[in-house]
Amino acid sequence: MNNIYQLKHSELFIEFTRYLTNHPNFSENLPEGGEVILLDTRDAGYTRFMLKSAPKTDRNVVFVDVGELAPIRSRVRKPKIVSRDTVKKSVAKPRELKS
C-alpha cells in the first residue's frame, strides 16, 4: 500500500473504530465476517487506490465513505513556557508521592 495512503487508511480506521464505539447501531449495517473498505470520496486518489485494492467481488464487502472528519482537538491543558534552568531543576529533584 502506498505509504501516504497507508497512513490515511490507519487514521480513518482509528476514527471509524471510535465512531463504531460511540454509535454501535451503525455496525448493524455491516455483514458479520465481512470486509469494510473505508473510502474518502473527497480524496479521489485515495478512493481510487482503495477500490483498486479491494476484493474483486462485492460479496461480504461493504464500502463506507467516512464523510467528514471533525478537527482534531488538543488535549493539552495549561501549557506554559519555561526556561532550561527551571526544567533542569524540576527533573533533578525527586518528587514526593502524593498519598
Image (cartoon, rainbow, N blue to C red):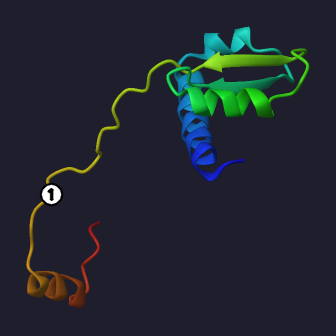
Front residue of 84 and 96: 84
Q: Which residue is mark 1?
A: 79
Relative to 9, residue 22 above or below: above
Q: Amino acid at mark 1?
A: Pro
The answer to whether 79 is drawn above or below residue 41 in the figure is below
In the displayed structure image, the side of residue 82 where residue 32 appears, left or right: right
Image quadrant for the C terminus? Answer: bottom left
* Residue found at x 80% / y 29%: 54
Q: How far across and down, in percent of the image, does residue 18 sit?
A: 54, 30
Q: Position of residue 94 (x, y in %)?
A: 26, 86
Tell me which residue sits at (53%, 33%) in the image: 15
Question: Could you classify mark 1 by the number of other residues whose Cα lies within 10 Å: few (under 14), some (14-19), or many (20 or more)?
Answer: few
Using residue 64 as the reference point, say whether residue 89 is left or right of it.
Answer: left
Residue 60 position, x and y percent, is: 87, 17
Q: Position of residue 73 (x, y in %)?
A: 30, 38
Image quadrant where residue 49 sits: top right
